[in-house]
Image: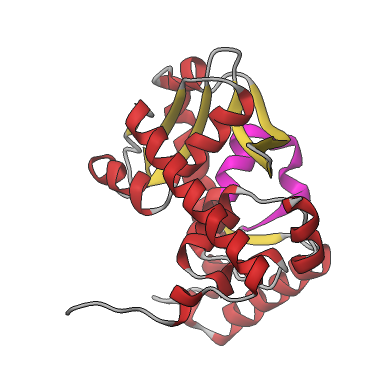
């Protein structure tokens, strides 16, 4: 069984949307991810996870994040660039150490306020009430054609699945679906939950936080399935042979 192979090889008996993406990039990265060796998180991912927590599980916010409320400190320090001073940097270092001790992520006051304004935009436009109502952060642990998959989805409604994304531009979001593997996500979620309606609620991170709602087409979900199948094939071959040849050898014309 694949679950047994995975558990014996990398200590984790299931796959996820993220692990599938890594398998399509590089099998060495995939193994590092599965072993928990890829820990560094970008500022964009930290903002996204903070936003999702405020939106879907605000009761857990203080357990996961600490806000660096620095406006008063900047006024106290004064000058044209208080954040560039050694006094400010030492103050931030103390906050970071406190956050590390508590096991939470430190986020800036500006990002915190922006996330709250973005959520308010979801409410006043009615998007929250129409496309983001259901069971939040729904956990699943199922199989797709014998492949064990586990994960969390933003919103499970009896009629649809929806996922909130932040984006630089709504006009480029269709390319993000392809480039970041969001189509894989749509395929996995629809398959394990038996629903055929999947929506992305894509919201621009710059004011006025414009929102676009996009339904995954049959073609998009089929593309996600093709990528999923290709990743599983690579993973299976890697586990069987402990080597993925096309990771180390690429032939082409430039």
| Magenta stretch prevailing secondary structure | helix
Q: Choose between 204 and 16: the one closer to the eye.
A: 16
User: Which of the 4 image quarters holds residue 215?
Assistant: top left
* Picture layout, residue 158 above or below residue 120: above
Residue 63 shown in magenta = yes
Q: How many numbered marks appear?
A: 0
The structure residue drawn at horizontal position 48% and vertical position 76%, both measured from the top left corner, is 245
Task: Report x, y in % for residue 75.
Answer: 52, 66
Task: Report x, y in % for residue 160.
Answer: 52, 19
User: Can residue 144 be spotted in the picture?
Assistant: yes
Task: Report x, y in % for residue 247.
Answer: 47, 76
Left/right of residue 239 with respect to residue 234 in the rendered view: right
The structure residue drawn at horizontal position 77% and vertical position 54%, both measured from the top left corner, is 13
Left/right of residue 193 with respect to residue 211 in the rendered view: right
Residue 52 shown in magenta = yes
The structure residue drawn at horizontal position 55% and vertical position 75%, both measured from the top left corner, is 77
Q: Choose between 59 and 34: the one closer to the eye.
A: 34
* Picture layout, residue 151 above or below residue 38: above
Tell me which segment is drawn in magenta: 49-68
Quadrant containing the C terminus in the rendered view? bottom left
Task: Report x, y in % for residue 206.
Answer: 33, 47
The structure residue drawn at horizontal position 58% and vertical position 76%, both measured from the top left corner, is 243
Q: Choose between 198 and 70: the one closer to the eye.
A: 198
């Amino acid at each position: 069984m694949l679950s047994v192979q995975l558990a014996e090889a990398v200590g984790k008996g299931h796959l996820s949307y993220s692990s599938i993406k890594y398998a399509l990039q590089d099998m060495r990265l995939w193994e590092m991810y599965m072993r928990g060796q890829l820990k560094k998180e970008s500022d964009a991912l930290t903002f996204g996870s903070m936003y999702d927590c405020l939106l879907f599980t605000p009761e857990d916010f203080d357990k996961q994040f600490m806000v660096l409320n620095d406006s008063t400190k900047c006024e106290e320090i004064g000058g044209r660039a208080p954040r560039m001073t050694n006094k400010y940097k030492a103050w931030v270092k103390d906050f970071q150490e406190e956050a590390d001790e508590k096991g939470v992520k430190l986020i800036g006051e500006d990002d915190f306020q922006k996330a709250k304004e973005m959520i308010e935009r979801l409410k006043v436009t009615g998007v929250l009430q129409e496309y983001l109502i259901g069971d939040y952060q729904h956990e699943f642990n199922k199989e797709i054609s014998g492949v064990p998959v586990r994960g969390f989805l933003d919103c499970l409604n009896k009629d649809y699945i929806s996922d909130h994304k932040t984006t630089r531009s709504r006009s480029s979001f269709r390319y993000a679906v392809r480039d970041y593997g969001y189509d894989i996500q749509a395929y996995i979620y629809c398959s394990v939950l038996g629903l055929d309606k999947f929506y992305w609620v894509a919201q621009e991170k710059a004011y006025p936080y414009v929102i676009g709602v996009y339904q995954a087409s049959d073609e998009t979900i089929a593309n996600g399935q093709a990528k999923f199948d290709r990743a599983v094939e690579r993973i299976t071959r890697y586990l069987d042979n402990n080597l993925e040849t096309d990771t180390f050898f690429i032939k082409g014309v430039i």
